[in-house]
Image (cartoon, rainbow, N blue to C red):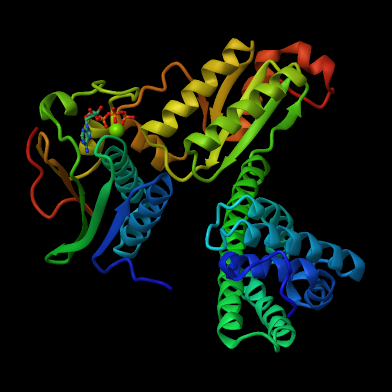
């Protein structure tokens, strides 16, 4: 059965196999929306990082994938949700090299650099939600001076 | 059916009567079951073997019935059944039959044996025959459960085995040159996969006395922090074995992504293509390789 990727979808994150599905789904959805190869690869990699965090640190959850549009520009919004332990210090978690396990500690900060919009919402004891958006051809608004 | 003399009415139990019936009509039941799909498809060569297999199952069932544990899938007698029918259903699974088909085939064993029971119990009181038939039906239901359980486990084991084979199959280590081995990686580099890659690569390094090992990631769709970590570990392990590791096949989109992700591959030698990596290693091997291999090599 082929589910068109351009329709909003909700995918479970409960195993390594699910991570494979998520990468495939995001890649296909991005390709269908006209993302170039580099944009696709960046978004898929960010999704892979966040989905693995949901699985490993959040104890599993799900990802929602929704196509968005501003004018004629298409984008993809991905929301990763878990009801795990949450992140006590989000600034610390986002800093490069910080890991509470045996990781590189680059996932969260790296994912933020790979997409156009990034929000991290976490409450200790309640869970974590990470929302990212990437646009097919650059964001439909002036780039903020960093 | 003749009532065994040693049994008084007070001791009578439908389970034990079933056990008794199975013992006494062992031969007849085995002859009927040997023609059932379940046994016939496995023992295609010799019918005698099918009859023998049937007898093993019947004996085990009569032990279960005698112990009055006809509803208990854990009853000791079922261990024998599991082994015999498990082996058979394993070959069914290999033949591509689904667990549901096998379950139906086991279910089909019930009719011949209940018919025989009915035919042999004509002279007995109806109520007693009904209770015995019910006990036999329950026993056959439990048998079906036991086989299902074995079939499903066997199915899982089969999938695990195939997955393992696929992993190894998908990870060929190629000898490119004297002292140079390469692994073209294809697909997702998860933890299980990267473990296999590392092991086969290190084995090849030792077996070929390789000084260089090339990991080609042209076929790896996503390089995230975990994949990067696996790559770096493999490189480090190869180094410990005395081989220098080169990662090749980093496509432009992947290279940009790695940079944004912030992963430092600085300590790893990388080349754009497998050919570049080979040229690099030949150069490093210098004249030693050229002498060892052929004059066609221009190590520049
Ligand atoms: N969904 C989550 N729930 C709870 N804690 C999280 C979650 N996501 C991230 N964290 C915390 O933030 C830390 C940093 O995450 P990050 O992805 O950057 O590194 P990592 O997962 O430890 O290693 P890697 O570089 O392999 O991703 C984690 O070690 C973990 O403590
Ligand atoms: Mg992570």
Viewer-proximal residue among B107 and A104:
B107
Against B185, residue A36 (above or below) is below
Against A121, residue B2 (above or below) is below
Residue A52 in the image: state x and y as whole percent: 32, 40
**In the shown orientation, is residue B175 left or right of residue A47?**
right
Residue at 53%, 20% in the rendered image: B235
Residue B20 in the image: state x and y as whole percent: 71, 67
Q: Quadrant of residue B92?
A: bottom right
Residue A11 in the image: state x and y as whole percent: 30, 57
Which quadrant of the figure contains the C terminus of chain B?
top right
The answer, for residue B249, to whether it is visible in the render is no
Count of numbered circles in the view: 0
Residue A119 in the image: state x and y as whole percent: 12, 42
Q: Quadrant of residue B111?
A: bottom right
**In the shown orientation, is residue A31 left or right of residue B99?**
left
Give the quadrant of ligand 2. top left
The answer, for residue B180, to whether it is visible in the render is yes
Viewer-proximal residue among B243 and A56:
A56
Residue at 38%, 51% in the rendered image: A18
Which quadrant of the figure contains the N terminus of chain B?
bottom right
Residue at 74%, 29% in the rendered image: B175
Viewer-proximal residue among B134 and A37:
B134
Q: Quadrant of residue A59?
A: top left
Residue at 23%, 23% in the rendered image: A96
**In the shown orientation, is residue B264 left or right of residue B140?**
left
Viewer-proximal residue among B28 and B101:
B28
């Amino acid at each position: 059965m082929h589910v068109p990727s351009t329709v909003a979808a909700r995918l479970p994150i409960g195993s390594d196999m699910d991570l494979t599905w998520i990468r495939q789904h995001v890649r296909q959805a991005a390709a269908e929306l006209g993302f170039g190869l580099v944009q696709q690869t960046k978004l898929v990699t960010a999704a892979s990082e966040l989905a693995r965090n949901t699985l490993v640190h959040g104890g599993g959850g799900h990802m929602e994938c929704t196509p968005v549009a501003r004018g004629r520009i298409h984008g993809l919004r991905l929301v990763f949700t878990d009801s795990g332990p949450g992140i006590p210090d989000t600034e610390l978690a986002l800093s490069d090299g910080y890991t509470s396990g045996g990781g590189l500690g680059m996932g969260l900060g790296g994912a933020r650099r790979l997409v156009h919009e990034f929000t991290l919402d976490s409450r200790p004891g309640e869970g974590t939600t990470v929302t990212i958006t990437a646009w097919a051809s650059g964001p439909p608004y002036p780039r903020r001076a960093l | 059916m003749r009532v065994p003399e040693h049994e008084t009415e007070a001791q009578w139990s439908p389970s034990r009567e079933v056990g008794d019936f199975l013992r006494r009509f062992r031969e007849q039941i085995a002859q009927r079951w040997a023609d059932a799909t379940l046994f016939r498809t496995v023992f295609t060569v010799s019918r005698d073997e099918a009859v023998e297999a049937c007898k093993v199952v019947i004996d085990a069932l009569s032990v279960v019935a005698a112990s009055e544990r006809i509803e208990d899938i854990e009853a000791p007698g079922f261990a024998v059944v599991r082994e015999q029918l498990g082996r058979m259903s394993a070959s069914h699974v290999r033949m591509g039959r689904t667990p549901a088909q096998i379950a139906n085939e086991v279910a089909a064993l019930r009719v011949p044996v209940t018919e025989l029971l009915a035919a042999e119990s004509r002279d007995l009181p109806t109520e007693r025959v009904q209770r015995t038939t019910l006990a036999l039906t329950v026993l056959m239901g439990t048998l079906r459960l036991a086989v299902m359980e074995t079939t499903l486990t066997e199915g899982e084991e089969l999938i695990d085995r195939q997955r393992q084979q696929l992993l190894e199959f998908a990870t060929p280590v190629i000898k490119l040159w004297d002292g140079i081995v390469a692994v073209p990686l294809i697909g997702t580099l998860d933890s299980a996969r990267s473990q296999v890659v590392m092991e086969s690569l290190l084995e090849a390094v030792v077996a070929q006395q390789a000084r260089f090992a090339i990991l080609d990631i042209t076929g790896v769709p996503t390089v995230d922090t975990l994949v990067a970590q696996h790559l770096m570990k493999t490189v480090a392990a190869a180094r410990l074995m005395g081989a220098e590791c080169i990662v090749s096949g980093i496509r432009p989109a992947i290279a940009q992504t790695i940079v944004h992700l912030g992963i430092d591959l600085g300590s790893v030698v990388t080349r754009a293509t497998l050919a570049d990596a080979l040229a690099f290693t030949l150069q490093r091997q210098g004249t030693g390789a050229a002498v060892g291999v052929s004059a066609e090599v221009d190590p520049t």
